[in-house]
Image (cartoon, helix red, strand yellow):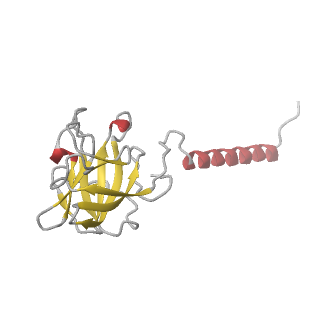
Amino acid sequence: MTPISASGTRCNVTRLTVLLAATAAVWACDDPYAPRADQANTNQTFMVAALTGTSLDAPAALQLVNKSITRIDGSFDFDMAFDIDKQNRPVVLPLGLVGTPISGSRLVGLLRVTGTFDNVTEAPKSGYVFDSAMVVAPGAVLAVQAQENICSMSFTPYIFAKVVIDSLNLGTRRLYGRTLINLNCGFRSLATGTPTF
């Protein structure tokens, strides 16, 4: 039997230390259990009718999970509705102020945020208002937190979005805006591309 020299033991300990450090670095950088986003965020434009003073079949609401505008009917299958008040200002109403969906109550909150539409890149963690309409000036940005059925099995049952009304046509009572909807449950990034948080 050949004895192990002290220098051989030191070499093995050094190799083991390097291997453990490399393994720790890999685990620290890549959590295999962390949720991953699978849908990219994209900007979209939309045009909706005001809730009042327009035809009942005109789309006056935004449905985040389907990235679509929709008319308001008895199913209340939308996240926010839009209107123009008596002072000709845009108004955004969360779902709870308009009705309760057939599928049950869902929380949809709105929050005024500072900055331009392009500069708002992260949804706030708190401060959303669920029971009040928001009167907004054209160009003012709202962050949206919406409880969605697609997130019912997720750790966080919300998706996030940002909305801006760019202009309105008082003659036709139409509102023109943009939105970015992050369909990845619990991810708060409001920048274009695949979110990382």
Vertical side of 89 occupied by 21: above or below: above
Residue 22 or 63: which is nearer the viewer? 63
- The residue shown at (25%, 60%) is 174
Residue 76 relative to residue 64: left or right: left
Q: Nearer the viewer, residue 37 or 9?
A: 37
Q: Residue at position x 37%, y 64% from top?
A: 120
For this orientation, the residue located farthest to the right is 1
Specify whether 69 is left or right of 96.
right
Could you tell me which residue is drawn at 54 percent across and 40 percent down? Answer: 32
- Name above or below for residue 104 compared with residue 138: above
Q: Residue at x 83, y 42 (%)?
A: 5
Q: Quadrant of the N terminus?
A: top right
Residue at the left extreme, as displayed: 86
Q: Position of residue 65 (x, y in %)?
A: 36, 44
Q: Residue 92: x percent and y percent?
A: 22, 56
The foreground one among 45 and 20 is: 45
Residue 52 spot, x, y in % from top left: 15, 54
164 vs 17: above or below = below
Q: Position of residue 123 (x, y in %)?
A: 35, 56
The answer to whether 50 appears left or right of 193 in the picture is left
Q: How many marks?
A: 0
